[in-house]
């Protein structure tokens, strides 16, 4: 609502003009209607323990407004995060402000800034990113300032266990770590 009030344009128009088009995100869009067009993974929910899975793919993220009304591929999410951390979207002072974080109190060491989380990596360093979920899907994405990016997604939610989120986080940390799963340094 703030974006629309300040610019006089819809949220989707501003996202397209300021982010999607300049970064050439070819698999990212803000749905204009309730249909999810094109090929995409099916999303499932499990309404209760032991209940059968329900296909919720037809529920459009547009119902979430700006909190979730964007659809993107992992490749485009990685491209976005890399561009953000390289300073291609914001002025340096704005990016510094976004990356000024406060601890969340969570045992995993995460800290939160202005729409951007930092999380520690095994062996040192941090990655920057965000998590998100919508009916039928859960996503975690991150990037390091030296150029590594990774996005992981599952197509079950709600109804998944805490282990699913833990596994997503472990996969992301492994992908972004400068050391592989066996402790050897990865040369990129």
Image (spheres, helix red, strand yellow):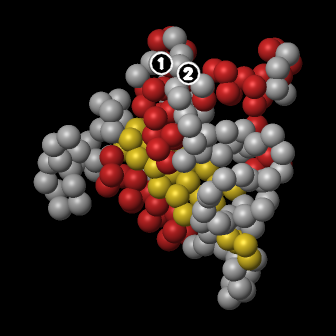
Answer yes or no: do the residues labelled 1 and 2 have beta carbons within 8 Å?
yes
* Residue drawn at 81 percent across, 40 percent down: 32
Examine the rendered structure and indicate whether residue 82 appears above or below residue 183: above
- Of the 4 image quadrants, the one containing the N terminus is top right
- For residue 14, side relative to residue 179 (left or right): right
From this viewpoint, which residue is outermost toward the left?
Answer: 184
Callout 1: SS: loop
Q: Is residue 99 above or below residue 35?
A: above
Give the mark nearer the N terminus: 1 vs 2.
2
Residue 37: x and y, percent? 72, 52
Compared with 83, 28 (above or below) is below
- Residue 159 image position (x, y, % from top left): 66, 73
Q: Residue furthest front?
A: 38
Q: Nearer the viewer, residue 38 or 46?
A: 38
Label drawn at residue 88: 1
| Residue sitting at x 44%, y 65% | 167
x then y, percent, for residue 151: 46, 49
Which residue lies under the disc numbered 2? 22
Question: What residue lies at 67% left-to-right and 27% top-to-bottom?
Answer: 16
Q: Which mark is residue 28?
A: none
Distance between the Cα atoms at labels 1 and 2? 9 Å
The image quarter containing residue 162 is bottom right
Image quadrant in which you'd find residue 137: bottom right
Question: Would you call the spot at circle 2 few (<14 residues within 10 Å), some (14-19), or many (20 or more)?
Answer: few
Circle 2: element type: loop
Q: Position of residue 55 (x, y in %)?
A: 73, 72
Residue 28 in the figure: left or right of residue 126: right
């Amino acid at each position: 609502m703030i974006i629309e009030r300040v610019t006089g344009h819809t949220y989707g128009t501003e996202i397209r003009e300021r982010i999607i088009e300049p970064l050439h995100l070819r698999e990212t869009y803000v749905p204009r209607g309730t249909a999810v067009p094109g090929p995409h993974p099916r999303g499932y929910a499990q309404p209760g323990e032991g209940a059968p899975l329900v296909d919720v793919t037809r529920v459009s993220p547009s119902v979430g407004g700006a909190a979730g009304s964007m659809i993107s591929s992992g490749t485009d999410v990685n491209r976005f995060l890399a561009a953000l951390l390289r300073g291609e979207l914001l002025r340096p002072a704005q990016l510094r402000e976004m990356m000024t974080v406060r601890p969340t109190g969570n045992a995993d060491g995460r800290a939160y800034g202005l729409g951007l989380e930092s999380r520690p990596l095994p062996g040192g360093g941090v990655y920057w990113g965000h998590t998100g979920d919508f009916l039928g899907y859960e996503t975690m994405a991150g990037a390091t300032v030296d150029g590594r990016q990774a996005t992981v997604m599952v197509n079950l939610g709600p109804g998944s266990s805490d282990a699913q989120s833990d596994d997503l986080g472990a996969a992301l940390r492994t992908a972004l770590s400068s050391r592989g799963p066996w402790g050897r340094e990865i040369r990129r």
